[in-house]
Image: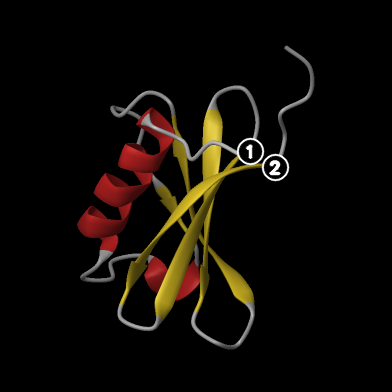
Amino acid sequence: MGDMTDAYLGEFTRGPAVFVVFRFDDESYRVECSDGNGPSPVCRLADDPNVPVAWHGAWNGDRWCKWIEAEARKVVADPESG
């Protein structure tokens, strides 16, 4: 399979915020957010939905957390091709 670290999988948006999902390693994914000020880390999530999401900084406890996790998992399940 080769090294898939930091492979772009896709993105989703909410208002002006663009969330980008990357495969981080063989078992986890990284989500970054860009709202016009450059990308910043949001969270890391595992393949296993029972493993708690590791939220970054101010994102921890944010009202968008459940929505972000759900949207990120949709991208992981059906990555953009190309």
Which residue is at the far right?
Answer: 2
**Which amino acid does the dot numbered 1 rest on?**
Phe
Per the image, label 2 sits on a secondary structure element best described as loop
Residue underneath mark 1: 24
* Residue name at image x 46 percent, y 36 percent: 79
Q: Which mark is residue 49?
A: none
Mark 1 surroundings: few (<14), some (14-19) or many (≥20) residues within 10 A: some
Q: CA distance from mark 1 to mark 2?
A: 5 Å
**Does residue 69 lie above or below 35 as drawn?**
above
> In the picture, residue 46 is in which quadrant?
top left
Residue 13 locus on image (x, y percent): 36, 67
Do the residues under discs 1 and 2 have CB atoms within 8 angstroms? yes
Residue underneath mark 2: 6
* Residue name at image x 78 percent, y 17 percent: 2
Screen quadrant of the C terminus: top right
Residue 10 locus on image (x, y percent): 49, 48
**Which amino acid does the dot numbered 2 rest on?**
Asp
Of callouts 1 and 2, the N-terminal one = 2
Mark 2 surroundings: few (<14), some (14-19) or many (≥20) residues within 10 A: few
* Residue name at image x 30 percent, y 29 percent: 49
Which residue is at the far front?
Answer: 82
Residue 30 locus on image (x, y percent): 55, 48
> In the picture, residue 67 is in which quadrant?
bottom left
Horizontal side, residue 53 vs residue 71: left or right: right
Residue 81 locus on image (x, y percent): 54, 36
Per the image, label 1 sits on a secondary structure element best described as loop
